[in-house]
């Protein structure tokens, strides 16, 4: 009798763990960078390669870093949301073009509009790796001290802006620099 109860018990435990796992959102991977300084970088601007983009230039401001690429299908879904966000002027949006070609990235922006204040060109993806990017799009909220406060994995939606990102941005803007 015990010989059958032990495998049955193990099977039940396995089913419970599996059912819990199925309810989790695979995109909701916590970032180890939350509440840590934003990784430093200096990359050429997409439109002006002789100039460089760095998080150090944003000290004292609350800003978003949006990691995107022209080959990214999900980036197409979020792009109208980012264009609308940029028109509000509520927060500075910095782009990190990830593992792309200069020509494709520029053409993509010409076709869809450019919501970014400035775009860093990360052709080989090394900066993306430093930021813990494992897929695009990803969006980070950075506070006035240069600390990462939130990471949104996947396309930014109007709902995510309304419920999570913009309330956080507004709260962070109230904090002293």
Image (spheres, rainbow, N blue to C red):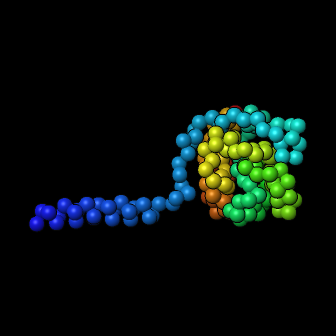
Quarter-wise, where is residue 122 in the image?
A: top right
For the residue pair 89 and 156, the one nearer the viewer reads as 156
Residue 13 horizontal/vertical position (percent): 29, 60
Is residue 174 visible in the rendered image? The answer is no
Residue 153 horizontal/vertical position (percent): 61, 54
Is residue 105 visible in the rendered image? The answer is yes
Residue at the image point whose x is 68% and y is 62% from the top: 74
Lateral position of residue 80 relative to residue 22, left or right: right
Q: How many marks?
A: 0
Quarter of the rendering occupied by the N terminus = bottom left
Residue at the image point whose x is 69% and y is 34% from the top: 40
Quarter of the rendering occupied by the C terminus = top right
Quarter-wise, where is residue 163 in the image?
A: bottom right
Residue at the image point whose x is 84% and y is 46% from the top: 46
Lateral position of residue 11 relative to residue 19, left or right: left
Residue at the image point whose x is 63% and y is 58% from the top: 154
Q: Taking 37 as reference, is 103 above or below it? A: below
Q: Taking 171 as reference, is 111 above or below it? A: below
Quarter-wise, where is residue 147 in the image?
A: top right
Residue 135 horizontal/vertical position (percent): 63, 53
Residue 134 horizontal/vertical position (percent): 61, 50
For the residue pair 86 and 153, the one nearer the viewer reads as 153
Q: Taking 75 as reference, is 132 above or below it? A: above
Q: Taking 65 as reference, is 104 above or below it? A: below
- As drawn, the residue found furthest toward the left would be 1
């Amino acid at each position: 009798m015990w010989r059958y109860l032990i495998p049955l018990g193990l099977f039940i435990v396995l089913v419970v763990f599996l059912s819990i796992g199925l309810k989790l959102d695979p995109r909701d991977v916590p970032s180890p960078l939350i509440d840590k300084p934003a990784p430093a970088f200096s990359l050429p601007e997409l439109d002006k390669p002789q100039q460089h983009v760095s998080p150090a230039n944003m000290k004292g401001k609350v800003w978003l870093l949006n990691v995107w690429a022209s080959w990214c299908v999900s980036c197409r879904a979020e792009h109208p949301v980012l264009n609308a966000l940029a028109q509000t002027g509520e927060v500075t949006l910095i782009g990190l073009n990830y593992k792309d070609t200069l020509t494709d990235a520029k053409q993509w922006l010409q076709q869809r509009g450019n919501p970014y204040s400035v775009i860093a060109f990360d052709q080989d993806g090394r900066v993306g790796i430093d930021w813990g990017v494992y897929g695009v799009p990803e969006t980070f909220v950075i506070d006035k001290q240069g600390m990462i406060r939130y990471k949104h994995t996947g396309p930014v939606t109007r709902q995510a802006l309304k419920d999570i990102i913009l309330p956080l941005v507004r709260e962070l803007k109230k904090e002293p620099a």
